[in-house]
Image: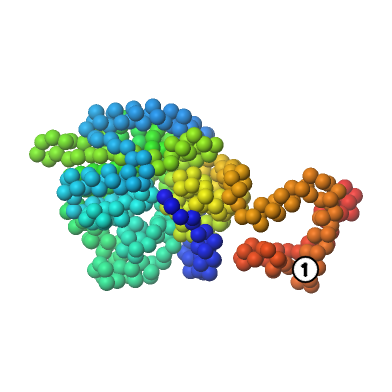
Amino acid sequence: MHDTPIQFHRHIKKALKDDNLRSNLASVRDKFTSHRAASVAAYNVQGDFESLREQGRHIRNESIRDMPQLLQQFEQNAEAAGAVVLWAKDIAGAQRLITAIAKRHEVKIATKSKSMASEEVQLNTALQEAGVEAVETDLGEFIIQLDNDTPSHIIAPVMHKRRDEVAAIFDGKIPCDGDDIDALTRAARVHLRKKFITADMGISGANFLIADTGSALIVTNEGNGRMVTTLPRVRVTLAGIDKIIPRWNDLPAMLNLLTRSATGQHLTNYVSITTGCQREGRDAKNAYIILLDNGRSALRRSDCRDMLRCIRCGACMNHCPVYHTIGGHAYGSVYMGPMGQVLTPSLAGLENTLDLPHAATMCSACAVVCPVKIPLPDLMRRLRARQVDKTLRPFKERFFIKLWAFCARRPRLYALAAVVLCRLLAIAGGSSGWLRRLPLSSNWFNGRDLAAPTGKTFRAMRKDLGL
């Protein structure tokens, strides 16, 4: 995903200065969180959402444990139904397979349903270089493509833009008879309808791959997903191998978890399931399913394998205070927010993503709302520990941690250091009682102030209370 380090600090400095960005994010965040809360409450009237989460965790753990066998079962059943199953080891492999399919079938236009896997492998760029026009048909992704931008959220890619910004993007690029939401949506629909009809190839991702039927499932709130997977003569499904689930009967639980956690809906508008394809006769169509690894097998063998349970609902970022301060682009990756802070280092390499596991308050809101109970803060701590073991952290940071550890192992020295430091910080706070700058901590104070201590340590205050 990345062959150069992500410049996280440079990204967040830009994001922290963008008041418009935070305003846009806040308005959408409140809708996501309130809708999820209402949907969970509604489910609890007839069931128990926590029990449903536990069921989802069990299904996904089984999927991870039996992944090789389940993928083999999926391949056999999908091919028996008429699809061609191909395997992509990495980004280059996925690009090579899909562009080869396009050339074999003389594809000129490819319509795409929203797919994070296609973003991960930079598919649009590869198709363009192969002479294929790739058209995003999800409304949010369509706007992003028109603006030469990238998604800022995995389920709401354009949540960082206001309506007037979208109207400015449309202006001069596609005909539009107004700048209200209905007019903008209607203009996109008219423009995309021509692409749906003339497309030679449709490309989608998959929310789930069902092993015992060889089926691929996508959930959408727009009809574009069905246009993409049914109208073109060639259909390509690109999905990570982690999307596998064992059984058709697992779908009710997984869909309930996904839709309620993502958008707060009881059920999404469209649940589309494709199984095989007709490859003979006058109206023959061709179906290809590309199973993407790109580091997932290595992640399965690591102590962060729980991350593979992720069903890409976005709930963790919807409730993350850091994400809603800096937005998705600051993470420098296709996968952002708490899930991206674990997934991106695991797929792209820890050395290229040094700051991501640290971009968290550790408030655990992400773990509380995760529909499949991924312990995201614990996984971030494991990645931090791995960085320390590999001496990937900056020298200054490692020096002060060792200094703290040296003192912590010597109680008398630690107590003396606490007294001295507490008094010095109280003096630095002055009459205002606030610390706004300290040596070697400029980055920390760029976005916050810190209340100065009173000059007494916790132990001293405890003693004053007679405890």
Where is residue 386 shown, x and y percent of the image? Answer: 58, 43
Where is residue 300 shown, x and y percent of the image? Answer: 47, 35
Dot 1: element: helix
**Quick check: can you spot residue 29?**
no
Give the answer, above or below, for where 232 lies relative to 23.
Answer: above
Q: Nearer the viewer, residue 248 or 45?
A: 248
Q: Nearer the viewer, residue 251 or 215?
A: 215
In the visual, does 168 lie left or right of 420? Answer: left
In the visual, does 51 lie left or right of 245? Answer: right
| Residue drawn at point x = 32 percent, y = 60 percent | 145
Give the answer, above or below, for where 466 lies relative to 436.
Answer: above
Q: Amino acid at mark 1?
A: Ala
Q: Nearer the viewer, residue 445 or 53?
A: 445
Local crowd size for mark 1, using a 10 Å CA cut-off: few (<14), some (14–19), many (≥20): some
Which residue of the protein is positioned furthest toward the left in this rendering? 282
Where is residue 104 shown, x and y percent of the image? Answer: 18, 44
| Residue drawn at point x = 28 percent, y = 46 percent | 96
| Residue drawn at point x = 89 percent, y = 51 percent | 463
For residue 240, what is the image quadrant? Answer: top left
Residue at label 1?
Answer: 428
- Display coloring: rainbow
| Residue drawn at point x = 36 percent, y = 31 percent | 71
